[in-house]
Image (cartoon, coloured by chain):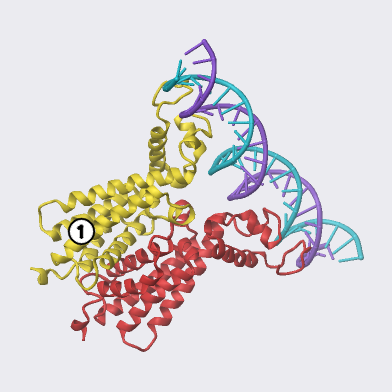
Chain colours: A red, B yellow, C purple, D cyan
DNA sequence: CCTTAATCTTGACACTGTCAAGATAGTTTT
DNA sequence: AAAACTATCTTGACAGTGTCAAGATTAAGG
């Protein structure tokens, strides 16, 4: 697909594998990604991928890792925007759910049990997730100072519970439990109301 | 295990399978439950279970279904208790997370993608989940009337978002992302604050 | 007692992850 | 340029999975 078919050496298999895997999970779901099919798609023998990823789990970790970079990017961008703090937070909630919806299979790898419970997360993955989380907590601290999020607890705790709420909403949608896509934005609005300090107080 | 070893007919295989499966997922996780191992544990040939459950998926649906009955039980019990509405709600949040923690593998089947996305949920399962959800929404309506939950939206919407928040917290714990069990009750308290109307208002 | 229906078993197939050993092709050293 | 080395890829194999088709065994009903 990438280069001519009959090369013994592929060129950059690692990269090709990640790209193909990303595409497969997006179109067919994580559960139908197999090392063998992946190898076949890339045009290489069944075990070739094992010279680039120790495990299937390691491959999945790499995919999840990418997701964390993207998500951290979203965060950083939003933190630096003009607009009011409250507007930016609201926008973030929208973006968070949009990310989850658009990259739902990656999202599942990032926060699902496939890696975090069953398989064991990579060191690289742990690091990436920690960094993203840290960025989030820093923003929460700002948002507390700006009277968008409550001050009734530490940034860590508020960050955890707020994120948990977003995560829950995301999961219900991407796991196919809330099906009505049309109700999503309504729920988001309500969620924001739950999470933020009453608007009249901050104004 | 249940009866003497050499019976050709097992007695009540359906029941034995469910019991054994429940035990296996509790001790080893859903992902390491296989039809063949299950059959072996119960002392029967590999394909015998297929005369009682069309699919592996169907078996899993049955397990999830049981979970919904238990959860509805918790709900109903709590709705009828004395105490103030707010106390009961707080208690429910604790119980919800306790259930998720104690039966984390069942919880995953109930609300996870294994069934709802990958496999297809049973009719029986859909019904059970709908009933439980309906009970929940009814209670939310009461709680709104009693000024515990906000009135700023319909019972359905408030029920959805509130539940999403609980679900998110539950998931982060059972999927092994928040690991500190000690922080749980602190998070629960904060979550309740987020979800409920300010205490001073309702008093 | 003999038929019928319920229940369970054996064999088989296609698929999975992964290991060990060998093949191939660039790279480096002599 | 020849030889040694190393990175990369392949073939073969094994144990495990879900599940189907066909046959064996036993309980229940007439």
Residue tagged by mark 1?
A: B139
In the picture, which quadrant includes the N terminus of chain A?
bottom right
- For this orientation, the residue located farthest to the bottom is A82
Residue D22 picture location, percent across and down = 64, 31
> Pointer 1: residues within 10 angstroms few (<14), some, or many (20+)?
some
In the rendered structure, the answer to whether residue B53 lies left or right of residue B194 reads right
Residue B158 picture location, percent across and down = 26, 67
- Give the camera-side residue of B20 and C13: C13
Residue A66 picture location, percent across and down = 52, 69
In the rendered structure, the answer to whether residue B192 lies left or right of residue A73 reads left
Residue A132 picture location, percent across and down = 42, 71
Chain name for mark 1: B
Q: Residue at x 62, y 65 (%)?
A: A20
Residue B43 appearing in the image:
no
The image shows residue B100, relative to residue B201, as above or below, that is above
- Give the camera-side residue of B31 and B83: B83
Residue B62 appearing in the image:
yes
Dividing the picture into quarters, in which one does residue A162 lie? bottom left
Q: Which residue is drawn at 40% across and 32% down?
A: B16
């Amino acid at each position: 697909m990438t280069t001519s078919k009959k090369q013994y050496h592929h060129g950059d298999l690692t990269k090709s594998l990640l790209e193909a895997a990303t595409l497969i999970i997006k179109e067919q779901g994580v559960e139908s990604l197999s090392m063998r099919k992946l190898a076949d798609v890339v045009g290489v023998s069944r075990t070739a991928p094992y010279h680039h990823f120790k495990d299937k789990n390691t491959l999945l970790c790499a995919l999840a890792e990418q997701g964390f970079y993207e998500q951290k990017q979203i965060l950083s961008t939003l933190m630096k925007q003009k607009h009011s703090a409250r507007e930016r937070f609201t926008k973030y909630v929208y973006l968070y759910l949009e990310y989850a919806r658009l990259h739902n299979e990656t999202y599942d790898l990032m926060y699902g049990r496939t890696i975090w419970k069953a398989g064991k997360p990579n060191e690289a993955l742990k690091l990436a997730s920690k960094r993203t989380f840290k960025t989030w907590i820093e923003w929460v601290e700002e948002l507390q100072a700006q009277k968008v999020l409550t001050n009734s607890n530490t940034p860590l705790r508020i960050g955890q519970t707020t994120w948990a709420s977003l995560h829950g909403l995301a999961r219900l949608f991407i796991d196919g439990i809330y099906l009505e896509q049309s109700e999503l934005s309504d729920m988001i609005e309500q969620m924001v109301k739950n999470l933020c300090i009453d608007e009249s107080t901050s104004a």
